[in-house]
Image (cartoon, rainbow, N blue to C red):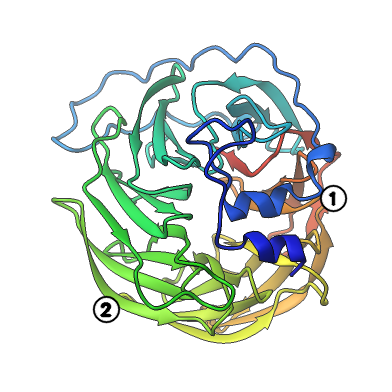
Amino acid sequence: MDEEERAVRGGSRATGRDGEPGTGWSRRRFVGAVAGAAAVVAVPVTAAEPPAPAAPAGPAPRAGERTAARPPRGPDRPRPLYLGTYTSAQGGGAGVGLAEYDPATGRITGTGTLTGVPDPSYLAVHPDGRTLYAVDERQDGAVTAVRLADRKVLGARGTGGAAPCHLSVHPRGRWLLSANYQSGSVAVHPIDASGALGERTAVVTHTSPAPGPGQQGPHAHQFVTAPDGGHLLAVDLGTDTVYSYRLDERHGTLTEVARAHARPGAGPRHLTFHPGGRHAYLANEVDDTVAVCAYDPPTGRLTIGAPQSSGSSGGTNYPAQFLVTADGSYAFLANRGHNSIARYAVEDSGARLRLLGTVPVAGDFPRQIALSPDGRLLFAANQRSGTVTVFHVDREGGGLRLAGGPFASPVAVCALPL
């Protein structure tokens, strides 16, 4: 860990780069910005693609349900790609980047920018494919909903915390979950039939255990639903803890049911489940390790296993995010610093990870990675180089092959292929 990283870990600036209130820089933003601003390349902005045609009329949904999404485009037609950035960072974007990708070649083509969403550093889509959600990673944190058919911003709601850095949609589509990094809290918002957000129904701050070594307080980094659908897991880097909650799906409230403690100083950042639902994989940002976790669906209890290699071979490295293939055979890890993607074979029905090696990411500081819906492509958002790189995924052997050159995207911190 370098001195600049140590100085800001757990802290933040109360104002943005131009001194305007409410655009504070969290530690996690600073880590990515160090030595990277000069490398950012601005993406060309062109006219946005026309709105997608409306789906044919069908039976009215029951109360609280969403209608089904329109049929997907053909397998070889361009697919939409949404790109997250920091609008208040030097060299950052003007909003959510709009692009398309060729599902066969992986080639990305920019189509414009969706403005009106400040600091959209993490993105998620509703299960029906009709609404995009973005965090507004600012001091006065919020989450924003965007209707994709005509790209209308449906409004923003406060998260009750500072610097929200992650959000996800509950599988049944009625609740949005978000994690406030700076204030160490998690929040729940209702989603109505139009995709718009209501006022939050819950916000919980992680007040214990005490912060881990080098931390100044809790730092919630992820809030996600377990495969059983009945439990939510919040990963907190500051307290070295993964909290399990039960969601009251009628009222949107949270009840804590279990805690899993990583070793002191691990700094857990991101958790990804195996499709079997009994195991998950944890990326530890601070001590540069990963861990296999056992999960018990009836109780929501997670048990964190022994630390394993991230594949970084020493040096400064911050593991960022895990992905697991749909068939559960392979896992991929983004390494910031080592600037690689580690490849793992998943064995023993998810209970074991075996490191296969690493592949250079062809960019600087891969903050986030994502698989295309068909699993044939892997996208890496490289924060410091301001690029998105794409890889072909060998689904038989877990290999990664670069798909052409990088796509320029200012301060690229999230890539969401649909």
Residue 97: percent from left, percent from top: 62, 28
The residue located at (32%, 51%) in the rendering is 187
Residue 220, relative to residue 190: is it above or below? below
Direction from residue 312 to residue 266 in the image, left or right: left
Q: How many marks?
A: 2
Image location (x, y in percent) of residue 296? 34, 80
Q: Which residue appears at 49% of the width and 22% of the height?
A: 116
Q: Residue furthest bottom?
A: 306
Element under label 2? Answer: loop
**Residue at horizontal 29 percent and vertical 59 percent from the top:** 204
For badge 2, the amino acid type reads: Thr
Answer with the quarter of the image where residue 353 lies: bottom right
Q: Which part of the image, by quadrant, shows the C terminus?
A: top right
For residue 387, the mark is none
Residue 202, position as x, y percentages in the image? 24, 52
Q: What residue sits right under mark 1 in the picture?
A: 362
Q: As rendered, which of 98 and 16 lies closer to the eye?
A: 16
Q: Is residue 254 visible?
A: yes
Question: Taking the image as drawn, is residue 130 in sight?
Answer: no
Residue 349 lies, with reference to residue 340, above or below; the image says below
Q: Residue 27 is drawn in which quadrant?
A: bottom right
Q: Is residue 159 above or below residue 308?
A: above
For disc 2, the marked residue is 299
Residue pictured at 63% horizontal, 67% vertical: 331
> Which numbered disc flags the more N-terminal residue, 2 or 1?
2
Residue 110 sits in which quadrant? top right
> In the displayed structure, would residue 49 be above or below residue 172?
above
Amino acid, disc 1: Ala
Which quarter of the figure is the N terminus placed in?
Answer: bottom right
Q: Callout 2: few (<14), some (14-19), or many (20+) C-alpha neighbours within 10 Å? A: some
Crowd rating for badge 1 (residues with CA inside 10 Å; few <14, some 14–19, many 20+): many
